[in-house]
Image: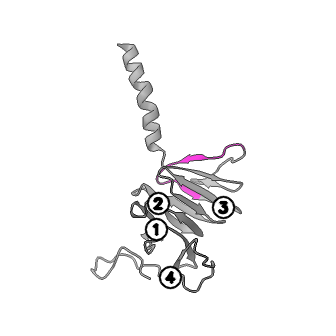
């Protein structure tokens, strides 16, 4: 009987631990997770979970999700991993390059509100100034300073009126 219980516990613990892992992050010096400096020497990837806040210093960091989607945070960027989407972040400052395997199941938020990614599976989201979000396509020869970048304004706080929208408008 005791062996059976030990066998079940031995099987359940690794499954529960794997279910809690949301993604992995890799980077170099200056990478922090939840305000704690991550030692990156000799450790290629760190497990991270929903709600974790990742910050970069002078180098970028790459977040690899379980479905193969990737978000690369630029230098001096802060983002929190989504707590309600299997693939996503809430960009708090800086830039994020994204490449989603399934855009319908992925999201990028800024200022705590969803960003309209214009159905792009690849692109760049940047917070510029205190109230502007820019979304640019990626991979088709567009320059980072392309004037055709799609602009989003910081939304007003939700007031309960029907005219308010949960999506940032461009």
Residue at disc 1, secondary structure: strand
Disc 2 or 3, which lies upstream in sequence? 3
Disc 4 or 2, which lies upstream in sequence? 2
Q: Which of 95 and 129 is in front in this view?
A: 95
Task: Kindly check if marks 2 and 1 are in contact, taking CB atoms under 8 A apart as contact.
Answer: yes
Q: Is residue 23 magenta?
A: no
Q: Which of 24 and 79 is in front in this view?
A: 24
| Residue interval drawn in magenta | 42-54
Task: Kindly check if marks 4 and 2 are in contact, taking CB atoms under 8 A apart as contact.
Answer: no
Disc 3 or 1, which lies upstream in sequence? 3
Residue at disc 3, secondary structure: loop
Disc 1 or 4, which lies upstream in sequence? 1
Q: Distance between the residues labelled 1 and 4?
A: 14 Å
The label nearer to you, 1 versus 4, is 4
Residue under the image location 46 percent in, 33 percent down = 14
Q: List the residue tagged with mark 1.
A: 109
Q: List the residue tagged with mark 3.
A: 60
Q: In which quarter of the image is the C terminus?
A: bottom left
Residue at disc 2, secondary structure: strand
């Amino acid at each position: 009987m005791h062996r059976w219980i030990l066998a079940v516990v031995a099987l359940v613990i690794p499954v529960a631990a794997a279910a809690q892992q949301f993604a992995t992050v890799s980077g170099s010096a200056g990478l922090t997770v939840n305000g704690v400096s991550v030692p990156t020497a000799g450790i290629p990837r760190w497990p991270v979970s929903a709600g974790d806040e990742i910050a970069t210093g002078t180098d970028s960091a790459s977040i690899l999700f379980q479905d193969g989607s990737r978000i690369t945070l630029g230098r001096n960027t802060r983002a929190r991993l989504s707590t309600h989407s299997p693939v996503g972040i809430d960009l708090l400052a800086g830039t994020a390059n994204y490449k989603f395997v399934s855009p319908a199941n992925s999201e990028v938020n800024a200022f705590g509100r969803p960003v309209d990614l214009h159905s792009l599976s690849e692109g760049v989201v940047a917070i510029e100034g205190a109230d502007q979000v820019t979304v640019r396509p990626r991979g088709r020869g567009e320059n980072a300073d392309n004037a055709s970048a799609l602009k989003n304004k910081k939304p007003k706080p939700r007031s309960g009126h029907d005219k308010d929208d949960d999506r940032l408008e461009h």
